[in-house]
Amino acid sequence: MNDTVAACRHPVPIETLLAYWLGETDEAATAAVDEHLLGCDACGARLDEIVALGGGVRAAVTAGLVSLFVTPDFVERLAAGGWRIRTERIARDGGVHCTIAPDDDAVAGRFEVPLAGVTRLDAIVESTLVGHAERLEDLPFDASRQEVVFMPSAAQLRRDPAHRVKVRLLAVDAAGERVLGEYRFDHRPWPTG
């Protein structure tokens, strides 16, 4: 953040600024953030940083360069914007055979998962191509939808040989963690000529 901007005594949480920028705050929250930003250069500077970072993230997502967990609403906004998204619905503790077609812009794995009472969601992702597991923490989710969406890198999928990816979703709270479900993708390259 710009060090010349005076610090804010009651900063807007980064999660709220992000939701505000994405248009995901309700009318009352939007009004409260608007009012705060009118008198707070520090929070305005933080919002400017989110907007600048968002442009780079948007470019990376659009180019299919990153794998990420997103909300169902995010996928629906992409589809409404004309994206061709190959969707694979995966039941709890299930798997699918999948691919990416030349005309697909993205692939979305929509995991059915019991999210009632979950406050933090982590994932352990394992690929036969990598040889080790990666833990991703504090994933976005909408408990009312009872699903979590994983969008693997489309650019990487187009280059990858056949492989398997396993995703284990974990609810994390003060008592520890518990497995909510395990999901498997068996990827095959698109057949060529």
Image (tube, rainbow, N blue to C red):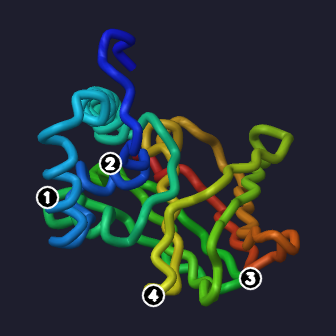
Label drawn at residue 113: none
Disc nearer the start of the sequence (2/1): 2
Q: Is residue 146 left or right of residue 79?
A: right
The Cα atoms of the two marked residues, 3 and 2, are separated by: 35 Å
Image quadrant where residue 75 sits: bottom left
Q: Which residue lies at the image location 69% right of the left edge and 72% below the top edge?
A: 183
Disc 2 marks a residue whose amino acid type is Leu
Q: Nearer the viewer, residue 42 or 136?
A: 42
Instruction: State if disc 1 and disc 2 touch (CB < 8 Å).
Output: no
Going from N to C along the chain, the mark reached first, 1 or 4, is 1
Q: Is residue 11 above or below residue 27?
A: above
Counting residues from the start of the chain, the first of labels 1 and 3 encountered is 1
**At numbered mark 3, what does the secondary structure look like: helix, strand or loop?**
loop
The disc placed on residue 93 is: 3
Q: Residue at x 51, y 82 (%)?
A: 143
Q: Residues within 10 Å of mark 1 (few under 14, many from 20)?
A: few
Which residue is pictured at 39% across the width and 45% down the height? 10
SS class, disc 2: helix
Q: Is residue 19 above or below residue 129?
A: below
Q: Earlier in the sequence, mark 3 or mark 2?
A: 2
When asked about the image quadrant of residue 139, the answer is bottom right
Amino acid found under the numbered disc labelled 1: Gly
Q: Which mark is residue 81?
A: 1
Which residue was labeled with disc 2? Answer: 17
Helix, strand or loop at label 1? It is loop
Tell me the mark number nearer the camera, choosing from 1 and 4. 4
